Amino acid sequence: MPELPEVETIRRGLDRRLRGARIVRVEVREPRLRRVVDEAALRSLRGRLIAGVERRAKYLLADVGDGLVWLMHLGMSGRVLLLPRDAPVGAHEHVRVEFDTGWILAYRDPRRFGWMRVAPLNGLEEIANLGPEPLNGDFGAATLRVRLRGTKRDVKAALLDQRVVAGIGNIYANEILFRARVRPTRRCHRLTERDLAAIAGATQAVLSDAVQRRGTSFSDYFDSDGIPGSFQAVLAVFDRAGKPCRRCRGPIKRRAHGGRSSFYCPVCQR
Ligand SMILES: [Zn+2]
């Protein structure tokens, strides 16, 4: 599932190629995504210019003018590809949007958990209750303290909660806690000031490294140019059960935890 670094990588590709491009054709081949696509609303994008592409958490927001955005969420397996106009329609291609610059945007999604819609940016319900963006300059220990203080849930569940921090999923939550040297099962109310500072710092460090490496690709993530990310090569704990810790060389442990796998080093993380 794409998380913040993958969506940010896609955003940069879309912004670079589509800013200033005019939409000339919209084709909805399969409206039954996670939510049914409003075909008429999407087709009404014809003639509009893309003023830029922004991101909030894992949402892509293309500014199409008049306060409207074309919102996309990639769900579990959604891919947004930029292709030349004559590119053949691919498998699971549900939406195809053509631009006057010769590019087409192809939305492909085998599992159809993603969705898209056109709506006013003001009052967009998808982003109304999201927590702070972790790559913003003002994100720090104080941001986390306000949101974690007094709760007894474990710190990993808190990091995965989009109201606490926007855009983090299972891969990066595990990596962040390793870098901060905090166990995934630690309870929030037991975190010290030092832990909070370490988690906040690790959040920014891990996510910005991952954006630099254009995200993490196992099998199904590719950016808008079809290029995989490379962060999987430097993962410290995620999907590394039994392999040596990059810090102490002891084996990485895996535990089922809250319906997902947690990976951690029992020596380095306390
Ligand atoms: Zn270790």
Image: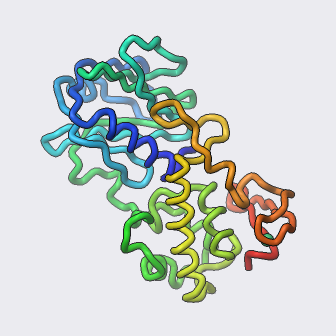
Is 34 above or below relative to 263? above
Quarter-wise, where is residue 28 in the image?
Answer: top left
For image coordinates 13% across by 41% down, the residue present is 66
For image coordinates 71% across by 60% down, the residue present is 236
Q: Nearer the viewer, residue 156 or 210?
A: 210
Quadrant containing ligand 1 reads bottom right
Which percent across, then down, holds residue 113?
Answer: 51, 36
Which percent across, then down, holds residue 87?
Answer: 44, 14
Is 137 above or below relative to 208? below
Position of the C terminus, as image quadrant, is: bottom right
Which percent across, then down, holds residue 38?
Answer: 31, 29
Please say whether residue 31 is visible from this viewpoint. no
Q: Is residue 12 left or right of residue 53?
A: right
For image coordinates 50% across by 60% down, the residue present is 208
Q: Nearer the viewer, residue 192 or 116?
A: 192
For image coordinates 47% across by 68% down, the residue present is 164
Q: Nearer the viewer, residue 74 or 243?
A: 243
